[in-house]
Image (tube, rainbow, N blue to C red):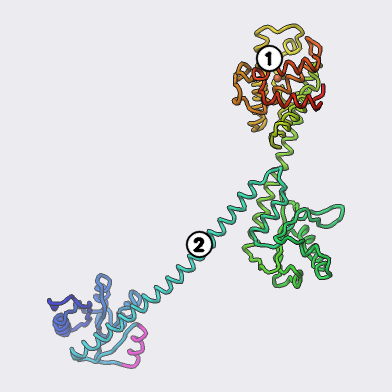
Amino acid sequence: MNINSEPKESILFIDDEKSILDVVSEYFLTKGYVVFTANNGLEGIEIITNHKIDCCFTDINMPVMNGIEFAEKLRSIDNTIPIIIITAYPSFNTTLQTLKNGVVDFLVKPAKLTQMEICLTRVLRERKLFIKNILLNKEVKHGKKLKRINAELFNKIEEIETLNKIMSDVAEIRASDDVYQKLVSLSSEITHADNASFYIYSEVLKKPKKIAYFSLQKQDSPLNSSSDKNLNVKDNLITIIHKIFSTQTPVISPNNDDKIVHGSDINYFMAVPLKIVNKIFGVLTVSSSNNIFSKQKLYYLSFIAEKASYVIENMALYEHINQGIITTLKAFVKAIEVRDPYTKEHSNRVTQIAVLLGTALNCSEEEIDILRIAGPLHDIGKIGIRDQILLKKGSLTSKEFAKIKEHPDIGADIIAQLIVWDEHQLIIRHHHERYDGSGYPGKLNKKNIPFLARILSVADAHDAMASDRAYRKSLEKDKIIKIITNCSGSQFDPQVVTAYLELCRINKIVF
Ligand SMILES: [Fe+2]
């Protein structure tokens, strides 16, 4: 090895003649190469496996493993290492066979050392270019792959974001919203459609009937215009939608065999079924004059329909359950009122007045709904109180009164067992609290008492005084107004009392 310079490439010489190996070793070592030698192909393979080799010179005729077998084996291990054959008997067949196996040159024995060196320099230079080319190719392939992965990733992220938006928008739909209107506007937004519609099947008309419509344009849907062309398209569309009610299969148009809406103001169209409990309930459609709908958009539209169907189904179930529970609870209240004829219809009247007060006090629609449900049930806790106490004509002992005072808690607990109605429970639990904090069961005061409970408290007191009781007759209007006015700030919220007095003044509250 030339000690003055960095080691050059590593060369492997394979020959069964030791003298040849000695000569080439000495020569190439002095030229600065790292030299390995082997007596046959098998030894050569061992060296290749354990060392980095840049070029091989090999004899052909050798024991154990000859040069041709070596070349074949080496190619299967590393096809970038060039092989130069040195043989005394080059034949056409050998040449052809070895060329297939990565042999890049032939030298005839006895080869001159300088000739070998020239050949080596050339082969190594070509190898460098070859490796560079492979690396470049890999880089290009890698770059293309990266680009493709990036694009796929970007699409995936976009898809996840879209699906998330659909899920959160659909989840925000409330029973009090126009569900179908929200559905069509969301569909148009997600699919970039000009128009979106929702159809149900009209048993009366015996065909699909549009119940919601959304358009990006200010003007009416082209399908609502009465031009001949659009009337044709409209008929065609109704036919497609009608078909979906029986096939329950989504449609994307135009596609290869379906150009039904082609040539109108609506060039592109998609429709998907909306199923509830596996039965078709409606058809959701979108259309556009110049936005082509992809399969991805069809997937989004189907996803919207699927999520919306859960919401509609849940709303229907909830409504059904609620109605069932409310009917049951109202039956309980009726049972109490039947036991005590003096409080007959009391709960309903209290509810009516509470709703009047709530409306006058600018309560939201949701709050009014809560009053409507909780109002009739506010005394439901009395179901657990014995007749001797509930219907007692004389004054109550402190023990009996303590029993009566349990009814708000019992009532709220009954409600809690049946359904999660926090707001409703709060009204029922606190309808006997007093504004000054001396009420029951929580001894809450002022704003600590839920607002709707403060409203119900005034309505309850009013009706108790305005109706006959076991122990007294109903009071006069002026007397009731006077008592409630006097209790403003002590028993009642002054704000509610003000609203109550105004409703009395304009005769909205009947005595
Ligand atoms: Fe009560």
Q: Position of residue 461 (x, y in %)?
A: 73, 19
Can residue 325 be seen here? The reply is: no
Quick one: which residue is furthest to the right in this view?
Answer: 204
10 Å crowding of disc 2: few (<14), some (14-19), many (20+): few
Residue in the foreground of this view, choosing between 16 and 313? 313
Q: Would you say 43 lies left or right of 152 here?
A: left
Which badge, 1 or 2, is on the more N-terminal residue?
A: 2
- Mark in front: 1 vs 2: 1
Seen in the picture, residue 214 relative to 371 is either above or below; the reply is below
Q: Position of residue 210 (x, y in %)?
A: 79, 56
In the rendered structure, find residue 46 and report the number of the disc placed on it.
none
The picture quadrant where one finds residue 43 is: bottom left
> Going 60% across and 21% down the picture, which residue do you hit?
445
Q: Is 129 contained in the magenta span?
A: no
Q: Position of residue 392 (x, y in %)?
A: 75, 9
> Going 56% across and 56% down the picture, which residue do you hit?
160
Magenta: predominant secondary structure element? helix
The picture quadrant where one finds residue 75 is: bottom left
Q: Is mark 2 within 8 Å of ligand 1?
A: no
Q: Is 96 contained in the magenta span?
A: yes
Q: Secondary structure at mark 2?
A: helix
In the rendered structure, find residue 404 and report the number of the disc placed on it.
1
Q: Position of residue 73 (x, y in %)?
A: 33, 77
Q: Quadrant of ligand 1?
A: top right
Mark-to-mark CA distance, 1 and 2: 66 Å
> Going 65% across and 51% down the picture, which residue do you hit?
307
- Amino acid at dot 2: Leu
Can residue 103 be seen here? The reply is: yes
Residue in the foreground of this view, choosing between 490 and 272? 490
Residue range highlighted in magenta: 91-101
